[in-house]
Amino acid sequence: MRKYKSDGELETVICNCCGKKLAVRDGLLREGSLEVEHAWDYFSEKDGEVHRFDLCEECYDEILRTFRIGVEVEEMKEFL
């Protein structure tokens, strides 16, 4: 869950799974997290809904351990 100041600067990021408040300084997130935004479409029970959430790195890792098929991981060649 993200909160922004009136000028649009990032103020707070909270993990939707465990409730941990993540480090934000000067409008920048300062620790690992996963931000998800998904627009559901015609063939779902959530057609027309947009879901947004944030996970801290620990919750992300915990959820991955429940997958029967692991995620694809690729090393980035360059960081922007």
Image (spheres, grey):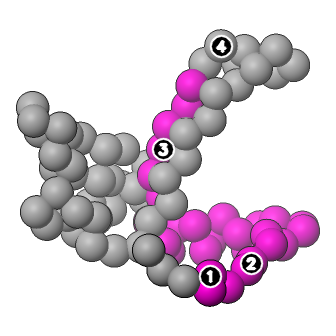
Q: Which residue is mark 4?
A: 48
Q: Residue at left 23%, top 63%?
A: 28
Q: Residue at left 9%, top 32%?
A: 6
In the visual, does 64 lie left or right of 1? right
Q: Which residue is mark 1?
A: 76
- The answer to which of marks 2 and 3 sits earlier in the sequence is 3
Kindly report which numbered mark, 4 or 1, lies closer to the viewer in this rendering: 1
Q: Position of residue 56 (x, y in %)?
A: 44, 66
Identify residue type, mark 3.
Answer: Phe
**Marks 2 and 3, how far apart at CA:** 21 Å
Q: Which residue is mark 3?
A: 53
- The answer to which of marks 4 and 3 sits earlier in the sequence is 4
Task: For mark 2, give the secondary structure.
Answer: loop
Q: Residue at left 18%, top 38%?
A: 8
Kindly report which numbered mark, 1 or 3, lies closer to the viewer in this rendering: 1
Task: For mark 1, give the secondary structure.
Answer: loop
Q: Residue at left 62%, top 82%?
A: 76
The stretch in magenta equals: 50-77
- The answer to which of marks 1 and 3 sits earlier in the sequence is 3
Residue nearer the viewer, 53 or 75: 75
* Quarter of the figure with residue 23: bottom left
Q: Is 70 in the magenta?
A: yes
Identify residue type, mark 1.
Answer: Met
